Amino acid sequence: MFRRSGICISRRYLNIQTRPILSIPYGTGQPTHETRSHYLPTSGNITPGISAIEYYQRRLEFSTKMPLNSIAILVGNDIKYSSGSVFYDFQQNNDLYYLTGWLEPNSMAIIEKGANEDDISLHMIVPPKTPHSELWEGPKSGLEGAYDYFNADYVESIDNCIKYLVQLTSRSKYIFWDSPNKSDSKKSFFSSLLSSTGSTNVNGTIGDIIAKSGKFIQPLSAKLAEQRAIKSDSEIQVMHAAAQISSRAINKAIAKVGSEFPFSTEKTLAKYLEYQFVKGGCDKQAYIPVVASGPNALTIHYTRNDDILYRDEMVFVDAGGKLGGYCADISRTWPNSPKGFSEPQRDIYEIVLNTNKKCIDMCDESKYNSLHDIHEFSVKYLTQELKNLPGFSAVTTNEVARTLYPHYVGHHLGLDLHDIPSVSRYAKLVEGNVITIEPGLYIPINSKWPKHFQGIGVRVEDDIVVGKTNDEIFNLSSGCVKEIVDIESLISSGKVTTPGVGEELVILDI
Ligand code: GLY
Ligand code: MN
Ligand code: MN
C-alpha cells in the first residue's frame, strides 16, 4: 500500500554559506533540482515528491481515454491583477499542472494521440525567454526548459500559438477542451455581464479556432477528473507531508493558550499559522483560513479574522498549508482558557468528535459508501447524540441539516481544495480517494436553543485516504490533536514536544 513515511528534517546537502555555481546553462521559471536543490532534493522530480516519470505516466494514462487522432488542449492560467500592475499570487490551471508540473503563466500543453495507441506526444506552447521579461521577472524556462525539464516532444512560442493550433486541430478528428467561459464555474453573474464574447483575447481566439474546426469536441476536465480522484502513492506522500506540517502548526497554536504569551487576536493567530505552515516546509497556506472566536464560528465562511480571541470562548480554526500544489485542510476547535473546556463546550465538542471518528471509520472501499452516504449518516448521528443533551430532546434531523450543521460532511482533496467537483457525491468511494471528513455543530444565538449552548460552533476536520479495507483507512492529519484529554494537556503544558517541531524545515526529503 501507500508509503506512510514521515517527514525527515535535514540540512545535510546544504551549504548555507556560499551559493553553489549553477550546473546548467540557464535558469528556469520555477524551482528545479539544479536551481533549488533544497526544495527538490531528489533528482528527477519536477515538483516536490512527483517525478518526471510520474507526470509522463499521468499523460499516458489520460491518453488511454482518448480516441485515435485526437488532441487534448490544456490552456494555462494568466496572471490576475488586483489593481494596476499589482498582481495576485499566480494560480496555475490544475489540470495542466497535474499533467505537466509546469508553473508559468500564459502557457498551453497539448497531448496528441496519433494514428496508433502508442503514438502519444506532448506539445508545450510557452512564453519564450526574452531579455526584457527576464530582466523584470527573473529567469523563465522558455522553450528550452519545456523540452529539457518538462519532457515536451514539441515546443513552440506562445506568440505562434494560433498557427500551431490550426495545424494540430486540422490533423485531428477529436478535440478535448474546456471552454474557459463554461469551465469557470465561479465567474460571477456580475463579471459575466461585463465580459465581451471574448473573441479578442487569446482564449476566445482559441475558442474560435476550435469551434470553427468542425471536429468532435468533448470536455476535458470531467474526463481527467476520474484520474485525479485516485491519488498515486507519491501524491499521498506529498499530501501526508502537507497535512503533518499543518497538524504541527495547529498543535503549536493550541499550546499557546497555556503559554506565557497567548494570542489575543484572530488576526495574529491566522498569521502565526501561515508562518508555521511555511516554516514547517509548506509553500504557502492552501486557502484563506477561518480563525474565529466563539460565535464568529457560526458564520461558515468567516474569513474576516479581525476580532479579539476572548478567554471564555472557543477558538475555531479551519486552515492548512499547501505543498507542491497539494492542499491540507484541517479544522480544530479548542477552548481559549488554560482551565480547558467548559461543560457546554465539552458536550458539543464530544458529539462532533465522535461523529468525525464514526465517519472516518466509514471510509473504506469494502463498505461501498459514497460521500453522500457518509453525509446522511453524519446528520443522523449528530441528531441522535444531540437528543441526549438537555434542551435538545426534540431536535429533528431536518433542523440539524438545515440549521445546526448546514454544510456537507466533506469533499475530495488534492491540488484543488475542493478537488474535482465533477466527481459525484453519489459515487462509491474507492481506494486512493482522498477526502475530508468535517462534521460540525453551530448553535445559533436564538432562544429556540438552550441558553448555555448558544454561540458555540465546533468543527473537527481531517484528511482521509480511503482504504481498500477498514485497516487501510489512513488519516493524513492524525498528528493534529483532537481528543479532549490531549487538547487539555497541550493547553496546560503550553508546549509541543515533538522532536524538531521548532526547527525551520529547509529540506523536505520527498
Ligand atoms: N476549508 C474549507 C473546507 O473545509 O471545505
Ligand atoms: Mn476546511
Ligand atoms: Mn474541507
Image (cartoon, rainbow, N blue to C red):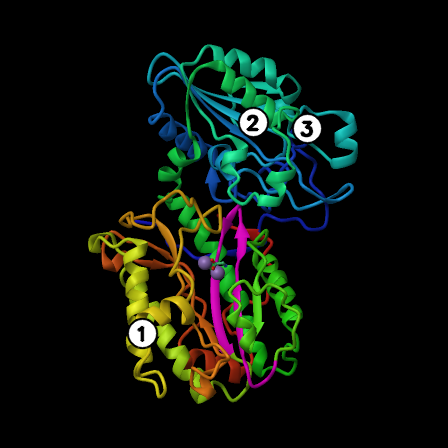
Q: Mark 3 points at which residue?
A: 26
Report the Cα–Cα distance between label 3 and label 1: 65 Å
Residue displayed at 49% across by 14% down: 213
Write the residue at 40% across / 67% down. Answer: 402
Image quadrant of residue 84?
Answer: top right
Residue 146 at what x, y percent from top left? 58, 26
Answer whether residue 189 is magenta in the image.
no
Q: Cβ(mark 1) to ligand 1 < 8 Å?
A: no
The residue labelled by disc 2 is 108
Provide residue 151's location: percent of width, then percent of height.
Answer: 51, 25
Residue at (31, 56) in percent of width and height: 372
- Residue with the mark numbered 1: 396
Residue range of the region highlighted in magenta in the rendering: 310-334
Q: Which of marks 3 and 1 is in front?
A: 1
Q: What element carries label 1?
A: loop
Q: Which amino acid does label 2 sit on?
A: Met
- Which secondary structure lies at badge 2? strand
Q: Which of 282 and 387 is in front in this view?
A: 387
Sequence order check, earlier mark of 3 and 1: 3
- Type of the residue with mark 1: Thr
The CA span between labels 2 and 3 is 22 Å
